[in-house]
Image (spheres, grey):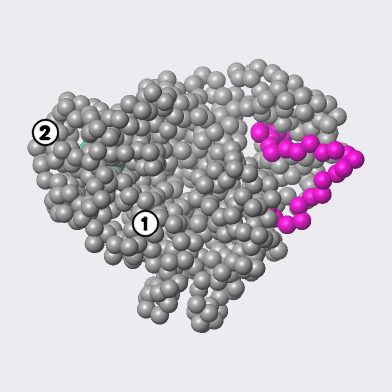
Amino acid sequence: MGSDLIDLKGVGPALVSKLKKLKIFSQYDLLFLLPTRYEDKTSLKNISALVPGEKSLIQGRIILTTVVYRGRRMLISQLSDDTGIITLRMFHFSKQQAKQLAENTIVRCFGQTRKTTSGLEMIHPEYQIINPEKPIPLETGLTPIYPTTEGLQQGRLRKIIRAALEQQMDSIPELLPRSIVKELGLLPLKEALQEIHQPSQKNTINDHENLFRKRLIIEELLANQLALKRLKRQTKKESAKSLATALLKELLISALPFELTKSQSRVVEEIEEDLKKNHPMMRLLQGDVGSGKTIVAALAMLIAVGSKQQAALMAPTELLAEQHFDNLVSWFEPLGVSVGLLKSKLPAKNRREMYAGLAEGRIDVIVGTHALFQPDVVYKNLALVVVDEQHRFGVEQRLSLMKKSSDRHSIPHQLIMTATPIPRSLAMTAYGDLDASIIDELPKGRGDIQTIIVPEEKRAQVMEKIVKECKVGRQSYWVCPLIEESEELNFQAAESTYTLLQEKLRQLNIGLVHGKLNSAKKIKAMERFKHGNTNVLVATTVIEVGVDVANASVMVIENAERLGLTQLHQLRGRIGRGKHQSLCVLIYKKPLSSIAKKRLAAIRGSNDGFVIAEKDLQLRGPGELLGTRQKGLIGLRIADIMRDAYLLPEINKLTVNIEENHPHAIEELVHRWVGDQLEYRNV
Ligand code: ADP
Ligand code: MG
């Protein structure tokens, strides 16, 4: 039996192409798709014993199913077991589903319980129809939840990962030299993978110091370090076009309605120096939320355009791409610089035109998501790539960018921008291949942000506050972040808050944006908020990065105790952009652990991203739960640079050791954890 995906039972060509999106090309890759968390579906709960806010597994008989219209169409079912009744509510459903949930059907549901005035309910639970003749056994172990992609269900993914484990367990190569495994007392790779995918112990698997987990964390950090060092060596050898025409840049600066801050000017100079050279710039621009990174990027791009070259700006989401596009158009069009927006879902004709414009050089500056760097996009002369919000952008992506030059002898300059300030002590580990610039001041004239911490019982008071703010014309975000990587699951929480606010705040217009909406709908919801048509925008963390609405003055964040400090700070950065005094409300669920208390206090105590990052580093460490992992700060799968910082001295030694004594191991380690892009320039 080979290790090709297609050889796995239940895997056909359609699935293979979905897996490609997750960078999974072989059965081995499947084994390294690691769960982000686990769910406990090992026992059924009585409906009478359900606790609002908690996720539980229940089973019962449908006593009523009906489609109703209350502001929007919804499917309502009532489920009863011997102990009580609960309502299941769905906003997105098919006729088929409505039929399936007919009276007397036995259904097993998993979802978050919420309490309403009319009783308990679950919004969009996962459910399974149970045939009483053939009852389905309960799970015997914890259910791993994997990062997934559109159209690929967890259940399906779990099944094939299980199959891959069975097939490949015995042939999965141990890449770490035996002497190192022994010296560090590491568990064998096989055991670690087995336990991570199919935990045998319920209580300790979420602990990041769990030895199984640690084994994988160490290997990943090591691979990442090896990749960075190699990348740095390689880029030093590359050449790039020297860009040095500053006229357009000067014109834009004089046309701006504001003056650049000192930091912004300094950073622009640093970038200018880099661009003059005929080696590629590899610069990281760190600047707190709202510090004004976009204009710096715009000025850099004008230097490229002035030198008759193209520039590209890549954003992490379509939402942000759209926003950048609007900004750039307003800055660039008066200068005669043409800007394009490459959306992922363009009609074929427009796409062809866009591609032709890029290939023929009619478009000077292009904005988009990673779609900018699909293989079929060809540039006439791309000389500068700006990547916004690098925390969704790891080494692998940086590598793939290098392929994008039209000229085989030079590669584009790269500017990578992030609002995630990393403590200096970690910067080398996170971004060892980059030079760093920092914007360390905010533009003048911003209103203050006050941060308060409230238990969820006081939600009603928070709503009153929002009504007040909206009355004087301000707007508010209400963020429902769960910590899953999968937007599929995240949207349940947003939907349920949306419903609640619609019920309670009838005098206000409530908007909703989450990952399950298609991108046109998302953009529309954002536009409505931006133009003041909605007062309150309920959102998942899709708004975490970059969204800029100066009139928004309140930010409510649910489940605040479960989020990383950086993420909280990012979210809070969506307000305080205008001159008004702003308020950030962190809602938590009791009881708060002592570490959670300290974290929330740290956020309340400072508005400075670097101070918060240092604090974050101090507060991380033993006992921390898996869920608070920074979402892929630098594209890592299981490690977290901050949380696992205590391992770094060891990792650095290990990196040198491998480079000196086991160089043959590097290739495969990097391939396994970082991806296969490295081979490209490995000549
Ligand atoms: P971020 O660094 O978070 O990406 P943005 O680039 O979105 O921040 O800038 C936030 C807001 O501040 C934008 O509306 C931008 O036009 C404005 N801005 C940027 N630089 C300045 C400045 N020097 N003075 C005043 N406003 C500025
Ligand atoms: Mg930004």
Q: Quadrant of the C terminus?
A: bottom left
Q: Which residue is under mark 1?
A: 680
Question: Mark 1 is on which residue type?
Answer: Tyr
**Which residue appears at 74% of the width and 44% of the height?**
57
Across the whole image, how many numbered discs are drawn on residues?
Answer: 2
Say if residue 610 shows up in the picture: yes
> In the orientation shown, which residue stands out farthest toward the right?
133
Residue 281 in view, yes or no: no
Q: Is residue 473 above or below residue 220?
A: above
x, y percent for residue 249 = 14, 38
Please tell me which residue is depicted at 54% across the width and 66% down the height of the picture. Answer: 216
Task: Say above or below: 157 vs 493.
Answer: below
Q: Is residue 557 magenta?
A: no
Mark 1 Cα shell of 10 Å, populated few (<14), some (14-19), many (≥20): few
Q: Using the numbered discs, state the Cα–Cα distance from disc 1 to disc 2 in whole angstroms.
A: 40 Å
**Residue sitting at x 52%, y 59%:** 638
Please state the extent of the stretch shown in magenta in the rendering.
Answer: 115-144
Residue 122 part of the magenta segment = yes
Crowding at mark 2 (Cα within 10 Å: few <14, some 14-19, many 20+): some
